[in-house]
């Protein structure tokens, strides 16, 4: 009987574990826990032009992106160069501030998409496959699958990164000078 109580208690405490690291739901059933900054493929420190399409609407803005092994920091800018928001991921914390965008913008999703585009393929593969997804990288393409179904597709070139999230129905295009950023 004592063994039964101990077994029940150990199972109950295991079930109560709550994830405290930032994450996003890449699919309806799979969490992607944001990777530590040291997994960036090559540090970035330059301007990017962002185009996004979601729910039939198109958005455009500039961003200064600084990302290295210490963290990610993005300053979002209007067409006139005024700061309209900031997103950062440092020390396991996602920070978002903007007078223009509501908190529901989903800064964690922006960081996750950035990581899928610019982080080390092996670290991504390990994290995604540990969550039950599969990751493929072939040349300039990256793809994430769930049970053989394409979830996210990324095409990278020296001046353009295009991410299409098939499941969530949105796309992002980043324009910049990425020539030295991809190995």
Image (spheres, helix red, strand yellow):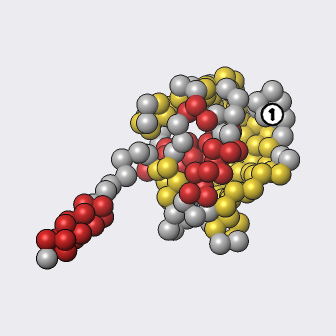
Q: Is residue 139 left or right of residue 131?
A: right
Q: Up-down: is 122 above or below 15? A: above
Q: Measuring 53% from the left and 29% from the top, which residue is drawn there?
A: 71
Q: Residue at x 61, y 51 (%)?
A: 126
- Going by the picture, which residue comes out furthest to the left? 2
Q: Which quadrant would the N terminus be assigned to in this image?
A: bottom left
Residue 169 in picture, x, y percent from top left? 64, 63
Circle 1: element type: loop
Quadrant in which the C terminus is drawn: top right
Judge left or right: residue 79 versus residue 36.
Answer: right
Residue 108 drawn at (x, y percent): 49, 46
- Could you classify mark 1 by the number of other residues whose Cα lies within 10 Å: few (under 14), some (14-19), or many (20 or more)? few
Q: Is residue 179 above or below residue 166?
A: above
Q: Which residue is mark 1?
A: 183
Q: Looking at the image, is 56 positioned above or below residue 118?
A: below
Residue drawn 19% across the image and 66% down it = 6
Furthest residue toward top: 45
Residue 91 occupies quadrant: top left
- Of the pair 91 and 125, the residue shown nearer to us: 125
């Amino acid at each position: 009987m004592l063994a039964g109580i101990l077994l029940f208690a150990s199972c109950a405490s295991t079930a109560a574990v709550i994830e405290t690291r930032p994450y996003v739901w890449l699919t309806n059933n799979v969490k992607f826990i944001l990777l530590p900054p040291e997994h960036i493929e090559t540090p970035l420190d330059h301007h990017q032009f962002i185009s996004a399409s979601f729910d039939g609407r198109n958005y455009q803005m500039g961003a200064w992106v600084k990302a290295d092994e210490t963290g990610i920091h993005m300053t979002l800018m209007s067409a006139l160069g005024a700061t309209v928001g900031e997103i950062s991921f440092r020390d396991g914390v996602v920070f978002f501030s903007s007078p223009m965008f509501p908190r529901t913008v989903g800064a964690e999703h922006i960081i996750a998409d950035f990581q899928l585009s610019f982080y080390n393929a092996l670290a991504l593969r390990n994290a995604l496959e540990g969550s039950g997804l599969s990751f493929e990288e072939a040349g300039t393409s990256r793809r994430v699958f769930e049970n053989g179904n394409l979830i996210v597709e990324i095409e990278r070139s020296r001046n353009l990164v295009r991410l299409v999230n098939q499941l969530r129905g949105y796309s992002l295009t980043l324009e910049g000078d990425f020539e030295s950023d991809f190995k």
